[in-house]
Amino acid sequence: MKTLVKITLSLMLTISFSANAQQDPMLSQYMFNGLYLNPAYAGSHDYWTSTFAYRNQWTGANFSGAPQTAIAAVDGPISEKNMGLGAIVMHDEIGVTVQNSIMLSYAYQLKLNQDAKLAFGLNAGLAHFSSDLDRVSLYSDEPEVSTDDPTFQGKRQVLIPRFGLGAYYFSDKYYVGISIPTSLFAFEEGYNFSFDISKASFLRRHYLLTGGIVLPVSENVKLKPSILLKYVQNAPLQADLNFSAIFKDQFWIGSSFRTFDAVSLILQYQTNVYFRVGYSYDITFSSLRGYQNGSHEIMLGIDFGKDLVKVKTPRYF
């Protein structure tokens, strides 16, 4: 080729409006953000709970456009505790694309036996995507060739209604969940109306399977393995495998392995009955490992409600 137009990595990192790859942000501390993964999680505790998380991915990168994500979530029980409500607000930046969204969740629980419940959940909301293509840097090997490509100029914005569903089977010691959390259906202007999301939007369905269990070792030590499987069309199946140790129901230390991507160190401290703080650090082993210094994620959990002081067992999920 006589002319090679090189596009900076910031464009390669962009979630473009026609991309089929994974489009929802990832969290290393997914086990503490159940509502983000599954709307059926809403109201799964006897009190209201909130979570605030911030993720700064690929810190110190020698390229622009590394992802940054902020999420706030709240949920709790209503109507004699067989129903739950929840809400999530999210801000996500990657490359030249920014996503702001809000999702509202409703869950209904069936008590199957003395210990376990099965919940079904739905959510609905709006996502606003904006790409500032003027920030994309283009240049050519040949000075006489113009790089003023109109394809990469101006701003593009779209507002998309989104819907999801999930099922969540849980007790105090274990859980299993399956969900399509935000992209069961989505409708974008300019597309024909269709229940096939690929014909109604640039978004693709994300299928999630989660599970975890608490295993007592001694009076003061418990082990908690968990798993998150993620699948989206035209992307490989990805697994997050986590193993944590819990000391005196207050201190958590664990590690997580994300296939094709990273290994994480995860810490959490239950300061009292109301507050939890968490931190994780990802060490990337993908092809980006030599161009950045890993990813940081912080989490703050605040539990509240009139029944909180009555809780006799700590919160594991």
Image (cartoon, helix red, strand yellow):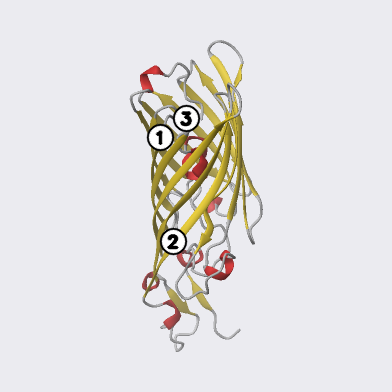
Which quadrant would the N terminus be assigned to in this image? bottom right
Are there few (<14), some (14-19), or many (20+) residues within 10 Å of tag 2?
some
Q: Quadrant of residue 189?
A: bottom left
User: In front: 239, or 62?
Assistant: 239
Which is more toward the observer, 110 or 298? 110
Query: Is any part of residue 192 visible from this angle?
Result: yes
Residue 70 at what x, y percent from top left? Answer: 38, 47
**Residue, disc 3:** 267
Q: In the displayed structure, would residue 74 be above or below residue 11?
A: above
Sort mark 3 into few (<14), some (14-19) or many (20+) by Cα contacts within 10 Å.
many
Q: Which residue is mark 2?
A: 161
The amino acid beneath tag 3 is: Leu
Q: Identify the element where label 2 is drawn.
A: strand
Q: Earlier in the sequence, mark 3 or mark 1?
A: 1
Q: Position of residue 141 (x, y in %)?
A: 50, 80
Q: Which disc number belongs to residue 76?
A: 1
Amino acid tagged 2: Pro
Q: Is residue 116 above or below residue 247?
A: below
Marking on residue 53: none
